[in-house]
Amino acid sequence: MTTVQERQPEQHAFEADVSRLLHMMVHSVYSDKDVFLRELISNAADACEKLRYESISRPQLSTDGAQPEIRVTLNDEASTLVVEDNGIGMSRDEMIDALGTIARSGTRAFMERLEAAKAGEKAELIGQFGVGFYSSFMVADKVDVISRRAGEEQAWKWSSDGKGSYEIVAVDLSEAPVTGTRVVLHLMDDAKKYTSKWTVEKIIRDQSGHVPVPIRLAEKEGAEASQVTDGAALWTKPKSEISKQDYDDFYRGVSGQYDEPLTNIHFRAEGRHEYTALAFIPGSQPFDLFDADRHGRMKLYVKRVFITDEAELLPRYLRFVRGIVDTSDLPLNISREMIQDSPILAAIRKGVTSRVLTALEKMGEGDAETFGKFWDLFGAIVKEGIYDDFERRSQLLKLSRFRSTASNEATRSLADYLRDMKEGQSAIYYITGLSLDQLNASPQLEGFRAKGIEVLLLTDSVDSFWTTNARDFEGKPFKSITQGLSDLDDIAGNDEGGGDKHEASPEVAAFIDFARGFLGQEVADVRVSGRLTESAVCLVASEHGPDRQLEKILQGAGRLQTASKPVLEVNAQSSLVKAIAAMKDQAFREDAAWLLLDEARILDGDRPTNPRAFAERQARLFALAMAQNT
Ligand SMILES: Nc1ncnc2c1ncn2[C@@H]1O[C@H](COP(=O)(O)OP(=O)(O)OP(=O)(O)O)[C@@H](O)[C@H]1O
């Protein structure tokens, strides 16, 4: 029973982010406002599935055993549209939590993108990703949510005009659903079309046709509701009876993303374990894809009852895959804790992972264009698996595509690379860095370019990691071209020129010894380079030191205090180096050696460690040059 006091409406302000989101939505010129309905229906269906799950352990929650149902009721006169479900419902606190804050992990990232987007792009973003319950305010100037949480003796009403605050008040049980939630939209004048049965029925069929709870529609209050969709689980139907449109619609419903999936993987496993999986590779990146704590989103069903979307049915590096697994091998009352340790689920995980990877492999072989799109969207995530998943490492390497000196697009597979290796070449060469432009300008590439030896250009942060533990591919080791000695001389390349290219003249050798003598604080060694053809100098990591790019990433993340010293390599054939080596003046030679080191740092994307000293040395050399010219 409610007391008089509880019947006093309480005012609450929306969390600042909600106000921002609402403001952006109401003011965006988004023409396709129909999306609000799919969001409300999706919430209603989730609520029904939650009740179905909770009542397995607490049967008393399911009042009179009513079948889950979503009912949409129109009212032309009152200009309202009502979406009602008999699902789990919300308590007062749950309402405050769910309808006053932003709970969805991707929404913040989404908002940032939305704020940065131009007007036209905004509309597209909203259409693609949906913005949940708050999208109601695109069509309604007032929204009431009346809800009774299953098992509770009190019902609550939440109301808002979407302008900064909302109100909560206790209501009589007679005014609320028996259990579940009724969302009443008071439609704006220009949204009256959502009271037309024909319009709303079409939107439901188009957008929510595969929601796993039946949807009924009543033309007006009190009128008999007719069934629009039957809530049958698409995945239980034979593949031959499912059209691409059905699959795409189902994907949209299950994922809450509104792009077109690149492909689906639908199969039934029989034998030791019985389950059906229907998985989709999305056609766009979810906003929180790179969030450290983003989990997989595959939904686990047991005998068509939704159990959880936190069962981690796929490894982390496939966390972009959306869909469901439905099994009859687990008990319905499996607790979420038991799910973690279930050997049956471990077997299912393995099975689904294999099928997804095999489907991707087939796509890579048979449909290069779609695979290219896939790789651009999710390649950086898949490569996390090369580092994490020892068992499937070679399979993942085979799947991977790379940019390289042979192609500016990410189209080269390692098989392509091996096929085009030069005679005498025994390693797969790569270089890691921040951008293609930076890598393409790397002096370390020069010798490889001159010989026509392909080098993989790796620009994702994850590349610096997997290359540390994936030793080889089909017996050929991975080798960084910025580490250790160059073995270019052993490889037959396109330029079969002079053999003594890496021999230093006595003067140059003496200059290198001189530089080594006082650059020792900064570098591990100064030596003749086997990899430069044009630039005078470059930096490389020592043979057993960590990769330089990895070091930079770890330092940037505060996980490494001291960096190891690099090796300064000098191009003994460079005319600049020869000229410097010929100079006798000690002060000049010293300045020149320091400047060469700083130049190598700059070419590597770094800064001189002492910019002031750098500027002074440069000024001295300029002065010298000018004095000689006057
Ligand atoms: N009909 C409903 N019954 C019960 N709870 C609901 C209902 N509608 C909304 N909620 C609650 O409000 C929350 C916010 O809903 P919203 O649509 O904004 O995001 P979401 O549903 O959590 O996200 P997503 O759309 O990605 O699943 C839901 O998570 C749920 O807890």
Image (cartoon, rainbow, N blue to C red):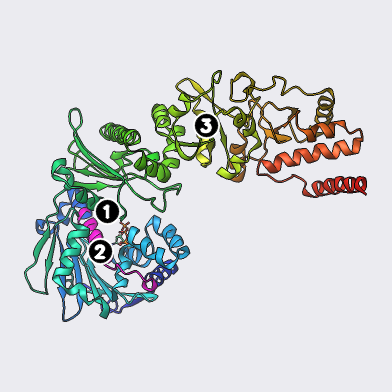
- Residues under labels 3 and 2: Cα distance? 46 Å
Could you say which is closer to the camera, residue 228 or residue 316?
228
Residue for point 17% across, 38% down: 328
Q: Main secondary structure of the magenta part?
A: helix
The tag on residue 40 is: 2
Mark 1: which amino acid? Arg
Magenta-colored span: 26-49
**Residue 11: % across, % down:** 36, 76
Q: Where is residue 562, by image quadrant?
A: top right
Q: Quadrant of residue 601?
A: top right
Whole-number angstrom distance, CA of label 3 to CA of label 1: 36 Å
The amino acid sitting under disc 3 is Thr
Most distant residue in the left direction: 224
For mark 1, give the secondary structure: helix
Question: Which tag, 1 or 2, sits closer to the chain's start?
Answer: 2
Which mark identifies residue 252? 1
Q: Is mark 2 within 8 Å of ligand 1?
A: yes
Q: Earlier in the sequence, mark 3 or mark 1?
A: 1
Q: Residue at x 51, y 29 (%)?
A: 469
Q: Nearer the viewer, mark 1 or mark 2?
A: 1
For the residue pair 403 and 587, the one nearer the viewer reads as 403
Badge 2 amino acid: Leu
Q: Is residue 32 magenta?
A: yes
Mark 3 neighbour density, 10 Å: few (under 14) some (14–19) many (20 or more): many
* Mark 3 in CB contact with mark 2 (< 8 angstroms): no
Q: How far across and down, in percent of the image, does residue 427 sit?
A: 54, 23
Q: Residue at label 3?
A: 467
The answer to whether the residues at label 1 and label 2 have Cβ atoms under 8 Å apart is no
Residue drawn at 20 percent across, 56 percent down: 48
Nearest the eye: 160 or 283: 283
